[in-house]
């Protein structure tokens, strides 16, 4: 397995800067795609070993909606967006311009809306991160699933464990007119991607 990339303090600061910019790009993408003015804010950004990822979202048995994307190109990358089911339904109300509480289940139309969120997250977040180093990525269509958080994260880890030792975990909010909907962005970049993005090699 590829060794874990250790980042210096300067590299960590640069990573936070790039991630914050990528999250802002996601906000712009959501506003462009939907008429609702939705802003994504990053509350906490951490790089953690893969075996700690499940603990970062709290209860592994929490029912969530997950949006999963893969990226290929100059490097590989995966991204999993998780939201509690009630928060996902509230987000669907906003995106579909429905009254608060109108969404009572995640049907075909709601899943499609969440898939569009995945498309925006993939294209604006992953490519924003890659563009900082001139890397080219092609993002796959998103897969939307509802399950326990631990099950969805475990499935993602099965895909990435062959090449990645770390994950970038972003504790975030979708915000709209005073409503804050918690979400988690779990990014699994190729270990060669981080030093390229940060402009320097790994190491303490």
Image (cartoon, rainbow, N blue to C red):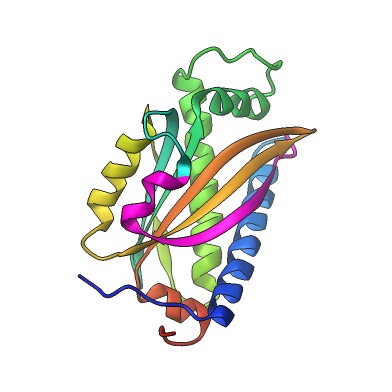
Looking at the image, residue 16 lies above or below residue 151? below
**Residue depicted at 67% across the width and 27% down the height:** 94
Determine if the magenta segment contains residue 108: no
| Residue ID at (59%, 26%) | 92
Evaluate whether residue 141 shows in this view: no
In the rendered image, residue 44, in percent from the top left (x then y), is placed at 60, 54
- The answer to if 37 sits in the magenta stretch is yes
33 vs 78: above or below: above
Q: Position of residue 47 (x, y in %)?
A: 46, 63
Q: Residue at x 46, y 78 (%)?
A: 7
Tag count: 0
Is residue 73 depicted above or below 38 in this figure? Answer: below
Residue nearest the viewer, comparing 21 with 107: 21
Left or right, 51 with respect to 126, comes to left
Q: Which residues are magenta?
A: 36-56
Q: Position of residue 180 (x, y in %)?
A: 69, 35
Q: Position of residue 19 (x, y in %)?
A: 58, 63
Question: Could you tell me which residue is drawn at 54 percent across and 28 percent down?
Answer: 88
Name the image quarter holding residue 74.
bottom left
Judged left or right of residue 165, residue 105 is right
Work out whether 7 lies above or below 168.
below
Q: Quadrant of the C terminus?
A: bottom left
Quadrant of the image containing the N terminus: bottom left
User: Position of 66 compared to 173: left or right?
Assistant: left
146 left or right of 114 in image: left
Residue lying furthest right:
177
Q: Nearer the viewer, residue 18 or 97?
A: 18
Quarter location, residue 177 = top right
Q: Nearer the viewer, residue 51 or 182?
A: 51
Snapshot quadrant of residue 33: top right
Question: Is residue 96 in view?
Answer: yes
């Amino acid at each position: 397995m590829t060794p874990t990339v250790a980042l210096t303090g300067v590299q960590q600061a640069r990573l936070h800067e790039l991630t914050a910019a990528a999250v802002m790009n996601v906000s712009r993408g959501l506003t462009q795609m939907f008429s609702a003015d939705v802003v994504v804010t990053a509350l906490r950004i951490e790089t953690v070993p893969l075996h700690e990822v499940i603990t970062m979202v709290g209860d592994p048995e929490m029912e969530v909606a997950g949006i999963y994307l893969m990226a290929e190109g100059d490097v590989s990358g995966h991204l999993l967006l998780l939201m509690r089911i009630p928060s996902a339904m509230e987000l669907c109300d906003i995106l579909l311009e429905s009254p608060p509480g109108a969404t009572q289940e995640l049907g075909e139309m709601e899943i499609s809306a969440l898939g569009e969120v995945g498309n925006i997250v993939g294209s604006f977040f992953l490519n924003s991160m890659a563009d900082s180093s001139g890397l080219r990525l092609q993002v796959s269509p998103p897969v939307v699933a509802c399950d326990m958080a631990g099950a969805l994260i475990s499935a993602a880890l099965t895909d990435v464990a062959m090449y990645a030792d770390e994950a970038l975990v972003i504790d975030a909010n979708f915000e709209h007119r005073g409503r804050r909907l918690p979400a988690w962005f779990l990014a699994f970049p190729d270990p060669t991607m981080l030093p390229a993005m940060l402009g320097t090699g790994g190491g303490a």
